[in-house]
Image (spheres, rainbow, N blue to C red):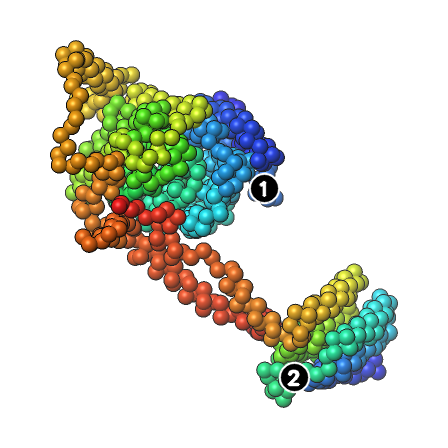
Amino acid sequence: MSIGTQLINLFAAVLLLLAFAMLAQRRVVSLIDLFAGQGLVLALSTAVVAYTTSQPHLYQSVALTVILKVFLLPWILHRLARKLDVRWEFEGLVNTPTTMLIGIVLVVFAFNLALPISEIASTINRSTLGIAIASVMLSFLMMIVRRKAIPQVIGFLSMENGLFFAATSATYGMPMVVELGIALDVLVGMLILGVFFFQIREQFDSLDLKHLEQLRDEQLARRAPPGLEDLAKPDRELPPETTR
Amino acid sequence: MTGALPGVVAAIVGWLAIGVLCILKPHDLRVVRVLFPAGAVIAVALAGIGLAALAAAPQSMVLPLGLPDLPFHLRLDPLAAFFLLLLGSASTCISLFSSGYFRNEEGAAPGLLGLQYHVFLAAMALVLVADDAYVFMIAWETMALASYFLVTTDHRKPAIRSAGYLYLLIAHVGAIAILLCFGVLQGGRGDYTFDAMRGVTLGGIAPSLAFFLALAGFGAKAGLLPLHMWLPEAHPAAPSPVSALMSGVMLKTAIYGMLRVTFDLMHVQLWWWGVAALALGLLTALFGVIFAAVQTDMKRLLAYSSIENIGIIVAAFGLAIVFQANDKPLLAGIALTAALYHSLNHAFFKSLLFLATGSVLHATNERSLGRLGGLIHRMPWVAWLALVGTLAIAGLPPLNGFVSEWLLLQAFLFTPSLPQSFVNMLVPLAAAALVLAVALAAYVMVKFYGVVFLGRPREPALVHAHDAGGLERAALLLLALGCVLLGLIPTNVIGAIDHVNAQLLGTSVRAAGESTWWLLAPVALERSSYSPPIVLVVIVGVVLATMIVVHRVWHGRVRRAPAWDCGFPLQTPRMQDTAEGFGQPIRQVFEPFFHIERHLPSPSDTTPVYFMRASDRLWTWLYVPIARTVEVLARVVGLLQQGRIGVYLGYSFVTLIALLLFVG
């Protein structure tokens, strides 16, 4: 096994470890740092792939990843967390050990799933496809179990990391246009969500998403269709025929 | 006539253009006063095209509109031409009436109404010339939506909104059935043009499935039992010209759809379909007329009367299927002629009556029969013209209603020649039911006319009622003339309808009978014949003779004196026979049909109020249970909506895992 492949496998393992760490981490600031770390590992592994297979266009992806995911997005998130004064996340519906166990099941599932695909792929880092799928799923899981808005957004962003990693390991990355598009999407999405955070907090004095649940019943009441049973009494607007 | 179909397309585009022009200045009444007559001119042209195309060979064209690879196929054949004639002639008068009728006060702005009205007309015309399921459904749904917005013109009243909602709901249920019907008819080939459907030979239960889907789908629009519920709600809610258009013309597009699917798109007709349609039609007719007899709102009364007439038309349609399936094309032709003739007649007299109620409504602001009366003195034009419509709908010779009902009865009288003994036994009952419905219709019309126009005004405010304006009078006059004309020249009308028979059944009624211009004998002279001119001459002669006798012999002997008051020293107009009083015998006889709420005052009551309401049992038996079931199901589905983002993400996650498991 060449040193490049070994390095890639090492980074992949670190990526998976970071995904689990993010799943368990409840301090928001540390979560953002872990996200930045994940971006860094992703960039490093992509750089190694680019070097060993001499794919120059991957260097551009590396640069983009470093700028966006290691510096820009974590910086925005840090600022948001400071301004909104979110530090801790309470434990959600599922406690942390259980979440980790579910995560392990997901990893096994992802490896099973990746097996037939990586046999077809001809890339040198095809064995890491399972890890890529696993990290996508772990991020998804994180979005499901978290209650606060910021960790959910971090889950969303790290899912994009997993997708990027999957693309590199299966086909040496997506076309540049697609990659740029996704990067821009993520950035704009982040900015819009930042605005939403402020709106949510102003409305409910908290970023806890459970307040959003109240919107549901009001909506139902407002959208109630005209009562069909009311029609059973014809001529309502006419006074009933009366004879005095 | 090579330019007929492009002419129809031009008319559709013209109506749409008028609609767009209407909306440019929505509140300017002058615009509406000019643009509606322009629409009427287009309608005249369309009627002319329809008349000319009846005898012409079918022609089709393809318009490069719509989705890629799905152009609009249009076709103009005698069947479509006949209904275009109906649409054009009825909407000419209705547009003329509307231009004088719409004002600024009624909910939506007149210009907006103009847009919806002309889109409605254009959609109906497009339905008639559509030659693939795609265009047909587009036009059909446009028609439903345009008429929905017209019904809810006065949308600020909650009762009108819910009437519109019910209409839209039933219209959509019907549209789904029609769509499924086309799905069955294309026979798995995936080609939805009507031409392809004509080429498909369906086997097994597929033809029956298609027929009953069509009957349900078009029946929902036509108002067949049990999907008639929207008619008595929507008609009182809609402005009168819209009611006239919906009842007179739109219901006929449903009849057109039934004929198109049954006789044109399918090759076989099974006799028991006809029996089912016949039974359903007669049941609907009886149901409609019995409910019409107990109504106290004049527009609801007419709505129920529309249900009755549609029932008669569908019964004739069913009879045509029975005959055609038993290979008796001549008799099938007579039944089909009766159905088409009655459609045309109904378009005229029902439009006339609905427009007359519109004039009464404008003059008195009153729809309730209990507060009208004596209007013949205040509104002689409307009253006398409405009398023509009333006599026609009651089926009195020499007007048009008599001819079609007579033809239908003739068709019934020939049924003993059928091979199915079971049908043979049932048909006399069916004929009796038809006669009962027709007779009760006459009763209902006596009630309608008598209570609204005759007697003395029941309310003091009625003294200030004014007659309709010039345009409205002209429209009513044209419709009344149409009723008379259609009654006087039945042989010519049947000659025109015969082209449709030739297309759908491959037979000609006219060649078989021994009819001349003044004598109608559909099968043979010795079996039956009817001569409207003779009837007219006799009626006019008798009336004149009576007048002469009265004037010459009894003249001068009239003596005016205080009447013996029969023990009632005080008599007020409120003591005249009321609508409820007139309908009471029917209510007694057919009591099981109704769900009656009644409040009778006790003798010691100082402010006695009598109150009675007869409503439809189908509400509580059919509609309310369905509505409840839907609500319960909706609540179960609503459990999915937790409001928590985590749960929603969980749904997508589980879906993703499941997909990966099964696909991957």
For the point 39% across and 42% down, the residue is B236
Whether residue B75 is visible here, answered yes or no, is: yes
Q: From this view, report whether residue B630 is shown above or below residue B172.
A: below
Report the side of B664 relative to B391 (left or right).
right
Mark 1 to mark 2 CA distance (whole Å): 55 Å
Q: From this view, report whether residue B613 is shown above or below residue A68.
A: above
For the point 47% across and 28% down, the residue is B100
Report the side of B109 relative to B580 (left or right).
right
Residue situated in front as seen by the camera: B157 or B348? B157
Label at residue B66: 1
Residue situated in front as seen by the camera: B58 or B606? B606
Residue highlighted by disc 2: A90
- Is the residue at mark 1 from the same chain as the one at mark 2? no
State the image coordinates of residue B555 (x, y, percent, origin top left): 17, 13
Which quadrant holds the N terminus of chain A?
bottom right
State the image coordinates of residue A237 (x, y, percent, origin top left): 39, 48
Q: Name the subunit of mark 1.
A: B
State the image coordinates of residue A143 (x, y, percent, origin top left): 65, 76
Name the amino acid type tagged 2: Phe
Corner quadrant of residue B428:
top left
Callout 2: helix, strand or loop?
A: loop
